[in-house]
Image (cartoon, rainbow, N blue to C red):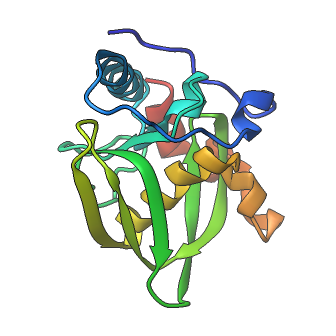
Amino acid sequence: MTIHTILKMGDPRLLRVAQPVTAFGTEALHTLVRDLRETMRAVNGAGLAAPQIGVDLQVVIFGSDQRNPRYPDRPLVPQTTLVNPVITPLGDEEEEDWEGCLSVPGLRGVVPRWSRIRYTGFDPEGQPIDRVAEGFHARVVQHECDHLIGKLYPMRVRDFSRFGYTEVLFPEIDAAEDD
């Protein structure tokens, strides 16, 4: 297992559209997933996408069975590895909420996301995943899957009066991000 450096906003690799995974159950895919998990854990992430560590594949991980110090008041999201995801909004309703990103360190912004979604894809063995999510769970999935189409959350911010440094907006969270 390897803890990778997370690419930061400005790196052109974060703007690419990731390629679909074509071979499931491979050692290379299992190694990628282990590396993503270790890297995410090391920095208290809520999720991580393969492009964030420079791997141009449609693989995202998210969730945990433990509270996240970067998102202390948020409900737990089931630990998931999602390969070749497809997101379908369930209705037109959106929710705005604060987001941060490991590729945009030290900043937070209010981002609109669909309130309820259905997400489909596969696990690393090629078994189908088909879930309905809402609230924070839906937000995390949408955020991570944006990385697969070359979007970072600041590209979705509509009101830049609600975008700024974590240390100013949320000093209690800023301390957890420095752990």
- Quadrant location of the C terminus? top left
**Point 73% across, 29% down: residue:** 13
Q: Residue 58's spot in the image, x, y percent?
A: 50, 41
- Quadrant location of the N terminus? top left
Residue 110 as seen in the image, left or right of residue 125: right
**Is residue 170 shown to the viewer in this render?**
no
Q: Residue 70's spot in the image, x, y percent?
A: 43, 42
Q: Which of 101/151 is in front?
A: 151
**Point 50% across, 14% down: residue:** 4
Can you tell which quarter of the image residue 33 is in? top left
Q: Residue 153's spot in the image, x, y percent?
A: 67, 54
Residue furthest front in the image: 22
Can you tell which quarter of the image residue 163 is in? bottom right
Looking at the picture, does residue 158 appear above or below residue 175? below
**Point 25% across, 29% down: residue:** 25
Looking at the picture, does residue 41 appear above or below residue 64? above
**Is residue 95 shown to the viewer in this render?**
yes
Q: Which of 80/104 is in front?
A: 80
Residue 118 as seen in the image, left or right of residue 86: left
Number of marks in picture: 0
Residue 14 as seen in the image, left or right of residue 95: right
Can you tell which quarter of the image residue 12 is in? top right
Q: Residue 11's spot in the image, x, y percent?
A: 78, 27
Q: Which of 97/54 is in front?
A: 54
**Point 53% across, 34% down: residue:** 57
Residue furthest left in the image: 65
Q: Which of 59/93 is in front?
A: 59
